[in-house]
Amino acid sequence: MRQAAALPYRHADGPDGTVEVLLVTSSSQRWIIPKGDIDAGMEPHLAAEKEAFEEGGVRGSISDRSIGIFHTCKQQDGAAVQAEVEVFPLKVGEELERWPEMAQRQRRWLPVSEAALAMEEPELQAIISSFRP
């Protein structure tokens, strides 16, 4: 199964301009980046942009260039399914007060190094750790 994920980021206020990444909670309350299935006929980066809006309530400028791929296990119809997830950076321009999945998810901004440590998948940790906008 193929999926797409957004890595929403912003430059924090302050003199050092630290890059922060937006994380959201999964249905099992783990911190993840917004990700989901790629609809038929949709470009992967546009699917990632859609997930950032639906799951994280952010809009911005999505890159059409992937910064990496990670593998994860997803529960589907009671069975574990392997998913290959392509990650696209999204420079956040707007953070909404209301968004489609706000009742199911929390969101949190973290510096890149802390966001990487919050991920369970080693491949995703590496992608986030090496991210430079």
Image: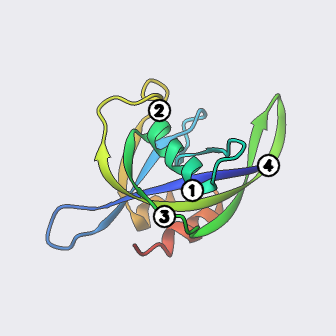
Q: Earlier in the sequence, mark 1 or mark 4?
A: 4
State how far apart marks 2 and 4 are (Cα): 23 Å
Mark 1 lies on a secondary structure that is: helix
Three-letter amino acid code of the residue under disc 4: Met
Reading the image, the residue beneath label 2 is 105
Q: Earlier in the sequence, mark 2 or mark 3?
A: 3
State how far apart marks 2 and 1 are (Cα): 22 Å
Reading the image, the residue beneath label 3 is 63
| Mark 2 surroundings within 10 Å by alpha-carbon count, few (fewer than 14), some (14 through 19), many (20 or more) | some
Three-letter amino acid code of the residue under disc 2: Arg
Reading the image, the residue beneath label 1 is 45
| Mark 1 surroundings within 10 Å by alpha-carbon count, few (fewer than 14), some (14 through 19), many (20 or more) | many
Q: Are marks 1 and 3 in contact (CB under 8 Å)?
A: yes
Report the front residue among 112 and 87.
87
Q: Earlier in the sequence, mark 4 or mark 3?
A: 4
Q: What residue appears at the point 58 percent right and 61 percent down from the top-left corner?
A: 87
Q: Earlier in the sequence, mark 2 or mark 4?
A: 4
